[in-house]
Structure formats: C-alpha cells, structure tokens
Image (cartoon, grey):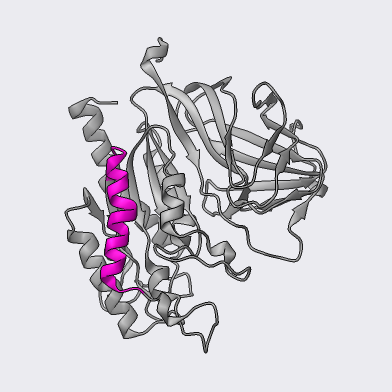
Amino acid sequence: MMTDKKDKKWVACWGNATSITNRREAVYAKDLTLRYPIRMAFNGTMLRFRFSNLTGTEPVTLTKVFVGHTPITFGGNGSVILMPGKETESDAISYDVSRGDTIQVSIYLADFTQMNSGTLITGPLSKGYYSYGDFAEADELPLDLTRNTNWFYFLNTIDVLTSADCRAVVCYGDSITAQSWPDYMAQLAFGTNTSIIRRAVSGTRILRQYDCITYQAYGLKGATRFPIEMNVAGATDVIIQHGINDIIHPVGEDVNPFRPWSDLPTVEEMERGVEDIYAKPAKAMGLKVWSGTLLPIFGWRTYNEQRDQMRQQFNEWLRTSPIFDGCIDFDAAVRSTTNPKAFADGFDSGDHLHPSERAYEAMAQAAAHKLIRHIRRYDHEENWG
C-alpha cells in the first residue's frame, strides 16, 4: 500500500510507437471521437499522458481529451495543439486506479485533422473505437455511429504514479511485435508489478526507411525511432526483436523501384546496427538488453536460401553476443522440429512470415519465462526498485 509520496515513482503502464499511417485517399478526419480502453497494470494515484504527432506534417488540435469523465489538461487547458514532429505531455492529474482496472481514454477532433500519426497494433488488450460526433464525455458510444479500430492515433504513452517497486519492460520491433505477443506477455506478467510497453511498427527495418507514400507506413529506421521510443518512465529492460525486414524486403528495382538490392545489408552490418543503434544506447540508459531471435520465413514470397542463411547467421549472433544480457529464442519457440526453416504445425498465420495466435502465445511464454523470472529475482533477492 502506498503511504508516502517518496515511496512512489512514475512508471509507464501502457505505450505504443508512433508512425506514419497508411496512405489512403482520405487522410483527414472531422467531428470524430476516438476511444481507447487501456487496462491498468498497477495501482496508482495520478496519471499523465503523452500524445504524439511525430510523423505529422501539420499541427493537430485535440479539442477534448478525457479519461473517463475527467478532463486531461495541458497547462490547465482542456485542448492542445500537437505540433508536427513533436510529442506533448499532459498535466499530471489526480486519478486513482487499481491494478486490473480498464480506463477509457477519449479524444475528440472537432475540425479537419491530419490523421498522419498512428500505429496499427493487434492483440487481446489492443482494441479501439471511433464514433462520428462528439462523444468524448459519453458513458457509452452510440452503436449506430461507432466502429472498432486497431489504429491508435496520437495516444503514445500513459504513466501512472505508483509504488516504487513497479517497472516497465519495453518490447521493440516490427509487425511481429505490433501483433499479439506483447499483449499475451502482459497477461502473463499481470500481478508481478511489471508493465509491458510495446514500441513496434509494421515494416520497419534496422538500417533503412521508405520515403515514398506507398511504403511510408513501414515506418522510420532504427536510428531515428529508437531514441524517441525509449522514452519510457520506469523502464528496466528492453527486448529487441527486429531485423527480418532488412533481409526480406529488397527484390531489385526491376521488380519494385522502391526496393533496390542495394538495400540488402550484410549480416555484419545488421549486427553492428543492433549493437550501435540499440544495445549500446539502451545500456547507457541503464537498461538490461535482451535479444529476440528472428522467426522462420520458409514459404514467404521472397524466401530463398541466401535470406534464410542470413537469418540463421544473425540469430546465432543474437544468441551468443556478449552485448546482450540474454536471448529470448523466439525462433526455437515457434519453429518446426522436423523442418527448422519453417513454422511448427499450427504456428503459421498462413503467410509464412507472421505467426498464428497460438504461436504468439508461445512467444509470450518464452519471453515471460526469461523476463518475469528475472524481474522477480530483482524483487525478492536484490530488492531494488
């Protein structure tokens, strides 16, 4: 039980990356309410919220922002302008939460709003809604004006003022991490004073990024993303599962003008990128760094033996490099025992790149086996926090 402010600290209890949204015919919204239910990992007495227009090219006005019936304010104001390329933190507001509570964060966009900053995520804890009209303060959204969405716009991070023994684990990666395994890991971690913060963008690569509208939603390169996304209060560990897109994307300009062979790195370049862009900076932040091996790609549309040899060589480095505090062998958790280049039966989503839900659960179990045990050791043996 929290009795004294000095025994409390700010810890991120939910987080997402911010990227360029998929370019469609319509990129603006007006008179729209977004609502995101967020489950609380901790007990707490205050909340603060970070909103991001990191990939926007125009100012964005959040006309109203509420958590439940409580206004979220910015310098005392109920609305805020998010400047392009910037992230904005709210005032800290008094708001009691208990572990397991679901809070509702609602954003009303009154005028034409560029919907350029957001990320697609999925999983059992990652659901959102949008409604036509102003329902930011409503108990319920009108059924006839509301649809589900897995696009999380502008809302980037939620921090809670909580017990000093709470902490956050960051899951950093691409589409595989933007999908379900961090949510399943959060379910496994529930009750351990640990939150799982997802920083993942589909299509992202360690070393490159796309600047054409066809692939802009594939996000920013690692050197740009990582320093921004690691702004996570109370973080103690980061899991890095990244690099498969560096291997599978290039096909040659004769096939796709945006995917030249010159984009294909060597394994050594990928290793150096992970070490210099991710591992060393994370260690400088005082974080423990866990590698995550790359999953099978046998049958994927750009699969060939060279790409798989690159993946396996990179995985061996991820398993053995002393730069990491340990390795979570996701590959071993989901691959076939008879054909290790492929997913195990029932573990392939069907595209031979992304796992099935059963496989995501297996990935979460592999991560929890290492990280939750590791965290409990800190709690009960070293007693730090």
In reply to whether residue 74 is colored magenta, the answer given is no
Q: Going by the image, does 336 lie left or right of 262?
A: left
Residue lying at 65% horizontally and 42% vertically, measured from the top left: 83
- Between 58 and 363, which is closer to the camera in this rendering? 58
| 259 w.r.t. 90: above or below | below
Is 257 located above or below residue 279 in the figure?
A: below
**Residue 346, can we see it?**
no
List x then y, in percent, for residue 157: 52, 38
For the point 47% across and 69% down, the residue is 349
Residue 148 at what x, y percent from top left? Answer: 68, 51
Instruction: Name the residue: 31% across, 83% down.
Output: 306
Q: Main secondary structure of the magenta part?
A: helix
x and y percent of residue 385 in the render?
30, 26
Q: Quadrant of the N terminus?
A: top left
Q: How many marks?
A: 0
- Report whether residue 50 is seen: yes
- Stretch of the chain drawn in magenta: 265-288
